[in-house]
């Protein structure tokens, strides 16, 4: 048996504006991950058989619709590996919540690419893994910036500008974060379409917001490198206000953000596409428990605590 793993991710600053060319910052979240296990099939006539208990998938590849993300991903992976798909059993296990802004889609494709690269003894480069996950994402939400596939394939904090090589950057001191899942699915394509519609209706107003968000990402990069944690909290709050103005926050997300701040977070914001999904809070190490409790009392279905390590 061979295996491949890919962890989740969150966006610290710059979501949505990144689609319009502004910088954004994303970090891996190693506490959640997709694991893929590949074994030669017991019954060689069965072709590729896929199992994923978390999404009730138990099907032969041939029976999946052509636009199924796993099918689309596998096709691109086999093309890149330049091998004929053999009879395989593929098991996909995931602890990444789906449609929550934690990168579950890109992580599935990248873990598949890693496991199959290992199985065929032709490991794919991180660049290839990233490109394949980007193509799959494109089928599903049209105009992805590429930040999800890039941070997950690289597995380290990145400063990302669409269309440019990502730059990994220095993290000066550990940055403790609490992530809360609102339990409300975050429809990335819907949120991206909403922002686009508003932009088409009033380009100048939207571009002012994108510029302001980009400015926050640029300063945040410096603050993280210099270990100026105390400036990052207000930056998160400011980024959240701009996301509210873009129309992608909701009453539930605002309640979670307010609860984290009241429990001592330096700052908090929604993370990812919005309309649901996750919020993140910047915490002192001693306050992680209080902030996590405050999130749960304010309606979050689960929390993850993580640290962005230098
Ligand atoms: O996949 P999510 O929910 O983390 O959202 C992606 C972030 C957006 O900036 C909204 C879209 C994109 O492609 O960058």
Image (cartoon, grey):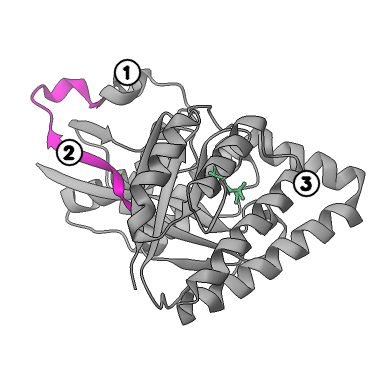
Q: Position of residue 266 (x, y in %)?
A: 52, 59
Q: Quadrant of residue 309?
A: bottom left
Q: Contact, CB < 8 Å: mark 2 with mark 1?
A: no
State the mark number for residue 56.
1
Q: Residue at x 42, y 66 (%)?
A: 157
Q: Position of residue 246 (x, y in %)?
A: 76, 45
> What residue sits right under mark 3 in the picture?
245
Is 219 left, or right, of 185 in this rendering? right
Q: Quadrant of the N terminus?
A: top left
Q: Residue at x 57, y 33 (%)?
A: 276
Q: Position of residue 270 (x, y in %)?
A: 58, 45
**Dominant SS type (magenta):** strand
Q: Residue at x 30, y 36 (%)?
A: 95
Out of 231 and 168, give the one closest to the viewer.
231
- Specify start and end residues of the magenta stretch as a single range: 30-51
Q: Is residue 166 visible?
A: no
At numbered mark 1, what does the secondary structure look like: helix, strand or loop?
loop
Q: Nearer the viewer, mark 2 or mark 1?
A: 1
Q: Contact, CB < 8 Å: mark 1 with mark 3?
A: no
156 magenta-colored: no
Distance from label 3 to label 2 (Cα)? Answer: 46 Å
Q: Is the shortest distance between ligand 1 and the CB of mark 3 under 8 Å?
A: no
Sequence-wise, which precedes: disc 1 or disc 3? Answer: 1
46 magenta-colored: yes
Is 146 left, or right, of 305 in this rendering? right
Q: Quadrant of the C terminus?
A: bottom left
Residue 255 lies, with reference to residue 268, above or below; the image says: above
State the mark number for residue 38.
2
Distance from label 1 to label 3 (Cα)? Answer: 37 Å
Sequence-wise, which precedes: disc 2 or disc 1? Answer: 2
Q: Residues within 10 Å of mark 2 (few under 14, many from 20)?
A: many
């Amino acid at each position: 048996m061979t295996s491949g793993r890919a962890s989740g991710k969150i966006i610290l600053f710059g979501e949505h504006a990144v689609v319009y060319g502004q910088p954004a910052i994303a970090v891996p979240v190693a506490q959640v991950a997709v694991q893929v296990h590949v074994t030669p099939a017991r019954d060689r006539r069965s072709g590729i058989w896929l199992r994923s208990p978390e999404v009730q998938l138990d099907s032969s590849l041939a029976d999946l619709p052509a636009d199924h993300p796993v099918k689309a991903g596998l096709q691109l992976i086999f093309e890149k590996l330049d091998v004929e798909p053999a009879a395989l059993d593929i098991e996909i296990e995931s602890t990444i919540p789906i449609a929550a802004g934690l990168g579950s889609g890109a992580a599935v494709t990248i873990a598949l690419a890693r496991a199959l690269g290992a199985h065929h003894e032709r490991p794919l480069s991180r660049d290839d893994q990233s490109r394949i996950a980007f193509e799959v994402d494109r089928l599903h939400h049209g105009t992805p910036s590429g930040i999800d596939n890039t941070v997950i394939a690289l597995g380290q904090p990145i400063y990302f500008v669409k269309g440019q090589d990502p730059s990994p950057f220095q993290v000066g001191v550990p940055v403790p974060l609490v992530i809360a899942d609102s339990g409300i699915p975050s429809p990335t394509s819907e949120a991206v379409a909403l922002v686009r519609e508003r932009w088409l209706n009033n380009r100048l107003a939207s571009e002012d917001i994108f510029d302001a968000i980009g400015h926050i990402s640029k300063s945040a990069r410096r603050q993280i490198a210099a270990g100026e944690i105390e400036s990052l909290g207000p930056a998160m709050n400011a980024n959240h206000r701009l996301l509210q103005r873009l129309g992608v926050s909701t009453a539930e997300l605002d309640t979670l953000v307010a609860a984290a701040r009241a429990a001592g977070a330096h700052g908090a914001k929604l993370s990812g596409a919005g309309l649901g999904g996750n919020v993140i809070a910047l915490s002192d190490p001693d306050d992680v428990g209080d902030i996590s409790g405050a999130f749960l009392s304010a309606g979050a279905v689960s929390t993850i605590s993580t640290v962005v390590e230098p």
